[in-house]
Amino acid sequence: MEKKEAPPKWMEVLVPLVSVASALLIAGFFLALQGIPPLELYSKMLAGSFASYHGISYTIVKTIPLLLCGAGLVLAFKANIWNIGAEGQLLMGAVAATWVALYAMPSAPSYLVIPAMFAFGFIAGALWGLVPGYLKSKLAVNEIITTLMMNYIAIKLVEYLIYGPWRGEEEWGFPITDKFPEAAWLPRIPGTSVHIPTLILALLSAALVYLLLYKTKVGYEARVYGSNPEAARYAGISSEKVILLVMAISGGLAGLAGVGEVAGIHRRLRYPWSISCGYGFAAIIVAFLARLNPLAAIISAIFLGGLFVGGDAVQMAFGLPVGVVNMFNGLMLLCLVSGEFALKYRVRVK
Amino acid sequence: MKLLSLRSVLEKPMVIEEISLSEMQVELGEPLVQMRGIVKIFPGVVANDNVDFDLYAGEVHALLGENGAGKTTLMNILFGLYSPDEGEIYVAGKKVEIRSPRDAIRYGIGMVHQHFKLIPTLTVAENIALSLANAPAINPSKHLVEEIERYSKRYGLEVDPSAYVWQLSVGERQRVEILKALMGGARALILDEPTTVLTPDERDELFKTLRRMADEGCGIVLITHKLEEALSVCDRITVMRNGRVVATVRPNEVVAADLAKMMVGRDVLLNYEKPPSEIGEVVLRVEGLRVLGDRGLVSVDGVSFDIRSGEVFGIAGVAGNGQSELVEAIVGLRKVESGRVEILGRDVTNQPTSRVLGLGVAYIPEHRIERGIAPDLSVVENLILKSYRNPPFSGRLAMNTDYVREWGKRLVEEYEVVTPSIDAPVKLLSGGNIQRVIIAREFSQEPKLIIASHPTYGLDVAATEYVRKKLLEQRRRGAAILLVSEDLEELLALSDRIAVMYRGRFVGVLEADEITLDRIRVMMAGEEEAS
Ligand SMILES: Nc1ncnc2c1ncn2[C@@H]1O[C@H](COP(=O)(O)OP(=O)(O)O)[C@@H](O)[C@H]1O
Ligand SMILES: [Mg+2]
């Protein structure tokens, strides 16, 4: 096995496409084994997610958190910091927004409470990212493990809140909070669940991450650190600054996604899985499918959003288990990683 | 179908058995291997363009050329790793086809690659057993161990058969590779740039071994880009440039300058002009420096010296005598236990690297890929690594992209960096061009002090010449230069004073008029000069 020369540009576009195609092919094989016609299923998925006004709007709803988390992960992965904790950071944003809406400013007008929810959501996500960031920068604790563990802490925290102190008084004992006051509901595109402020923030986040990485000093420092920490040290770049900043922004963006989910969709805090359904993990695929290009992440987030929606659409029709979309995501990640490998290495059999 | 495969199995070794160099009678001076009209085309490059090459029994044959000349490709073809697009190969006068290394080994051709292919968690004997068709790999027989010892003795390839490979030095690993090839029956042995990983002593040992092997009837191909090596140990020298053979000569027919010209295609400086320079104030002062190595043992033990502006201070010594640790301590990459480092009168002992380098210090690190560059970033982004922080490269937050690009283009031109564009990832450049990027970055800042660790290590002739010229240019400009190198010719050519380091101490410091190669050699072995 040896390293190859530089892959040509068109290959870099081809790899994600081929990875997706291979994932479709492999998944199709298994579906066919189960007696389900894959082509028919895929076309139903496509129809479900992109062919109707309802489908498209639903796809956008899913795209929003995927893009917010994905843009943050692009930043982190560019700096070679393995933030696997977007899921937990998202949930903490949701918790913060709930606190603002129900407890901190229950009777404030929209123009105060909505910005406040986003601000506190960002801060909460950022703090959740800073804990592993601090451990990495000060004590060199591996961030993959800590960010992953922080997810479970966030999940347990949300469960505790909705079963315990925050359980709604008007909800007949269900483990959910009360509904947010109307002032804290995010405005939607009429007739859909697309919450407008978060959609705008999501698109902005992709652009901002791009500008940050390629036009600013700290972005440059983050990329140098990501490419070679030794060279960064020698150039006097503070690894602590890079790690903390990257984890804060990456976590903060995921936090914004959490605000959107509770204030834009559910209008209350509820079961962790109903708030997020794994956006923070799927965002890892968003980032890699975009080959760590923040602008391309817009497209890959839409694609994954469509996949979620299409998956929902066919589950009923074909009587498939819930795990199908996850299986497909997993396959796609595998194909992506192998594609990336094939791009960089050549394996010779002797 | 069964019949067919059986036949091919039966036939193949039969054909090959007929011609195996290890069994055959090839007189000294007769050709072992002949390559005729070899053409090999890679996408975008003609790596070998109609190449003829002969290897005789009893000779050490240098294959000399700059990086990218096509040497490795040609020998990989002979060893069956690549198949040629055109051309023929003869072994002992008979036309053959070499489809794989296995074929090559059966014909009696062995190769030691630039990167060794040993398994670190196995012992020497186990590794050798693995490569031999008919020996059990686990628990190699006593017979095999004895055999290894016999070969070791015969060729002067000292190595302990029961040692684990991970315990061995690079030089020892190379010996294992050579033993492996020899015991596999190699009579034509190819070594790809074997000396780049060796200390001077190990290199001399290797050359003795090669000589002995040749005298016993082997043919040795020594791939190298170093002139002295080709001239010192080889019987014939084939020079390649741009995929073609320029000439095959004998060492006594040429001088170094001729070879350099053949390799590079133009006249090359081998003797550098070093006019007396204006010696100025003390720029670097090191006093009683004590530094620990990675294993916690003292590796710099009370070293003191001054370097003044306009002066090149060379440090000679066999690798591992504390030179690296000394440099790392000066630039703040390693803790100083006691003693003092002063730059331009300021105490920088145990200061962070960025502060030290911020004082106008240029650092050309020993491990240029690991320390010197951010490989995924572009050429221009690597050029600004030291200056990006300040105007006009950047404002308070944003990079000043236009200025940066302009400046990058100018530097790439001025320092003749060969790159597809300033936006190409720097990792795609050749070693020589990566070093140019580093030098452009460091020297464009008009440093007061330059700390250069092995600045031409592994570079080809043209790049080496370039780096040395640039260092002398900086000396003329008035920089103080600390030059650590294992290349004595380089130290001699560039230094105004030379210190010889041995076991963490300076054995002595030679002034310009006292410097001779022999004196340095003696001192490198740790013997103080009786002067
Ligand atoms: N496997 C390969 N694929 C593509 N190009 C190659 C390959 N191997 C070598 N080359 C190219 O062929 C030329 C000769 O390379 P090489 O034989 O390694 O030179 P040398 O060993 O003399 O430094 C170079 O331009 C190199 O980039
Ligand atoms: Mg080579």
Image (spheres, coloured by chain):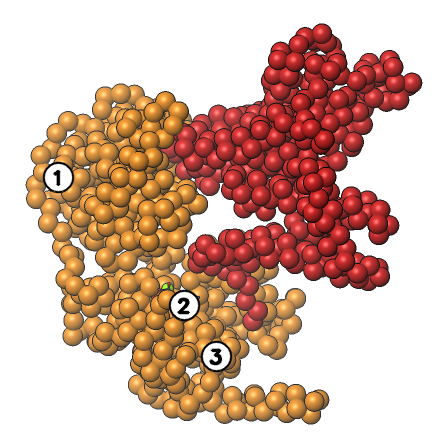
Residue corresponding to mark 2: B43
- Please state the horizontal and vertical placement of residue B15, each as a whole percent of the image: 52, 91
Q: Nearer the viewer, mark 2 or mark 1?
A: 2
Q: Amino acid at mark 2?
A: Pro
The chain that hosts pointer 1 is B
Residue corresponding to mark 3: B104
How many angstroms separate mark 3 from mark 2 (CA)? 25 Å
Q: Amino acid at mark 1?
A: Arg
The chain that hosts pointer 2 is B
How many angstroms separate mark 2 from mark 1 (CA)? 44 Å
Name the N-terminal-most of marks 1 and 3. 3
Ligand 1 located in image quadrant: bottom left
Residue nearest the viewer, comparing A51 with B453: A51
Residue nearest the viewer, comparing B425 with B126: B425
Q: Relative to A286, is B127 above or below?
A: below
Labels 1 and 3 within one chain: yes
Residue corresponding to mark 1: B476
| Residue B309 image-quadrant placement | top left
The answer to whether mark 1 and mark 3 are in CB contact below 8 A is no
